[in-house]
Amino acid sequence: MATPFWKYHALGNDYLVLDPERLDFPLQPLAIQRLCHRHFGVGSDGILLGPLPAPGADFGLRIFNPDGSEAEKSGNGLRIFARYLWDGGKVGGEPFYVQTLGGLVQAQVQNQGQQVQVAMGRVSFQSGLIPVTGADREVIQEPIQVQGQTFTFSAATIGNPHCVILVPEATPALAQTYGSALENHAFFPQRTNVQFVQVLSPERLRLEIWERGAGYTLASGSSSSAAAAVVHRLGLCAPAVTVEMPGGELAIRIAPDFAITMTGPVTGVAQGILASDIFAG
Ligand SMILES: N[C@H](CCC[C@H](N)C(=O)O)C(=O)O
């Protein structure tokens, strides 16, 4: 049996969707690394495995990073999965529930599949939930040293961990220079996603992103959610913000309890069949 795949991107953060019913190999880390490889594989910022059975939800979803690690949540991944279900006639325009490792989310496909809204869950700044080492506390504006530089960071979880650093100017160089050292810093036992955030106005943020297990990416939905929540917690942005990233913009809405709603586009790229020798050599 040949294995089909579907490729989409969400603001340049691209994923392959694999159907667990039509997978003719075990989805182990080495296979994931090969599938995501930009030269030896199909190439993507991750794998979405679904729909899976999920008691208490309409669909289950597992999310994998290109390094083979499993992520608890992916905002862009959830928008892509919602569009995939819509393309396959498994959902219409009604809201539906998806169970992820990082919790239950509600999604709704809009504008004939061009846009998806996701209730991403609640952001927490609690060290024990993120996790961040040290005393139980909200991790707000603390020092962190990497490569001789001291940054001030806040940390948040929306199912997956985030290290948020406000800077006067968010540049790709900051993410690409310090991202890996921050991702793997000892403060984060599960590693972390990293965002450098520039506050353009109370309604507009600019992000540069280094993702756990993926590296520099052009956009990230969970990063946008976590970074906007931190900036709002610091009193520096409104509860409704536009998050600008190299790949494009997301609309983030923050409720008083830090429940996040994320709305943004999805674009289809290709559908294909994996070659029988993709894992050879
Ligand atoms: N690399 C992330 C998962 C993907 C997040 C990102 N692609 C998004 O859109 O949220 C992690 O290990 O938590």
Image: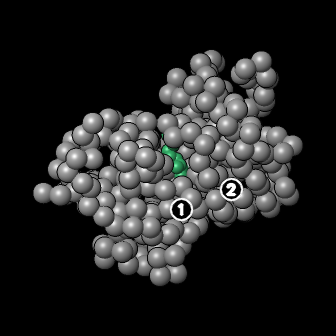
Quadrant holding the C terminus:
top left
Q: Is any atom of residue 163 visible in this view?
A: no
Q: Secondary structure at mark 1?
A: strand
Q: Is any atom of residue 85 visible in this view?
A: yes
In contact (CB < 8 Å): disc 2 and disc 1: no
- In the rendered view, would you say 7 is above or below 30? below
Residue 80 image offset from top left, x and y in percent: 45, 63
Q: Residue furthest front?
A: 281
Quadrant holding the N terminus:
bottom left
Q: Secondary structure at mark 2?
A: loop
- In the rendered view, would you say 146 is above or below 208? above
Q: Amino acid at mark 1?
A: Ala
User: Residue at (30%, 56%) from the top-left corner?
Assistant: 18
User: Residue at (77%, 55%) from the top-left corner?
Assistant: 205
Residue 56 image offset from top left, x and y in percent: 31, 56
Q: Amino acid at mark 2?
A: Pro
Compared across the picture, whether 209 is left or right of 8 comes to right
Density class for disc 2 (Cα within 10 Å; few <14, some 14-19, many ≥20) is some
Compared across the picture, whether 54 is left or right of 63 comes to left
Q: Residue furthest left?
A: 1
Query: Which residue is tagged 2?
Result: 246
Residue 171 image offset from top left, x and y in percent: 77, 45
Residue 94 image offset from top left, x and y in percent: 42, 76
Density class for disc 1 (Cα within 10 Å; few <14, some 14-19, many ≥20) is many
Query: Which residue is tagged 1?
Result: 10
Q: Quadrant of residue 200?
A: bottom right
**Alpha carbon distance from label 2 to label 1:** 12 Å
Compared across the picture, whether 235 is left or right of 116 comes to right
Q: Nearer the viewer, residue 243 or 180?
A: 180
Find out if the beta carbon at label 1 lies less than 8 Å from the nearest ligand 1 atom.
Answer: yes
